[in-house]
Image (cartoon, rainbow, N blue to C red):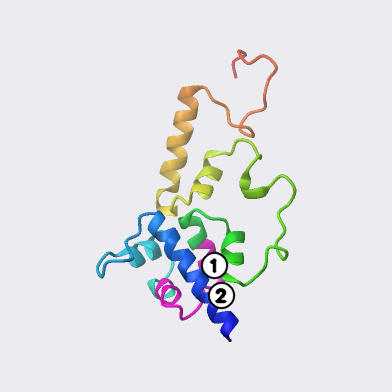
Amino acid sequence: MGEKSSDMERFAGWVEDLMRERGYDIDSPRGGGRSRLAEDAGVHRAAVTRLLQRQSLPDLETMRALARVLGVGLRDMLIESGRVTADDLPVPDGAAGGAGRGRVTPAEAAELLGIPDSHRRQFVEMAEMIIAVSGARPEGVRPRRRDASASS
């Protein structure tokens, strides 16, 4: 039982740190950080409260939503919670933390950045507009041509 409670304590502290880093006010009585996180993640406020009060760990779907909003991978969330170990979820070669995987699409960037679903379409459209105006071509959007000046 002691090991589970220490996992819970460590995990809740880790989530609190992430919340503070992301601008969620959880330190003042009426800061609204818990409610705002729950709303941004699309989860019940009670799930966030139970976690931060060290009463229970969130279920998988809640962890997935919190990970997205807090800008961390679900793998990291599961490992930090103590539910699995890093050995249980090995990272494929060349995929560590998304590093080295090249460019991402605007939709992938929204996911990686934890853009809330309520703002995701707007984020993707804005990113696509900036890409179009700048002339940049994210990999996977169009095949690369040998002649970069060729028109599409």
Residue positioned most to the bottom: 1
Q: What's the residue type where badge 1 is placed?
A: Glu
Point out the image quarter for the C terminus.
top right
**Residue pictured at 49% horizontal, 48% vertical:** 113
Q: Tell me: 89 left or right of 55.
A: right
Q: Which residue is mark 2?
A: 7
- Quarter location, residue 148: top right
Which disc, if any, is residue 61? 1
Q: Position of residue 146 (x, y in %)?
A: 70, 17
Report, in whole angstroms, how far the alpha carbon at label 2 lies from the one at label 1. 19 Å
Residue in view at x 34 percent, y 62 percent: 36
Instruction: Tell us which disc is closer to us: 2 or 1.
Output: 2
User: In x, y percent, where is residue 24?
Assistant: 35, 59
Q: Is residue 77 above or below residue 136?
A: below
Magenta-highlighted residues: 48-65
Say left or right for 65 vs 86. left
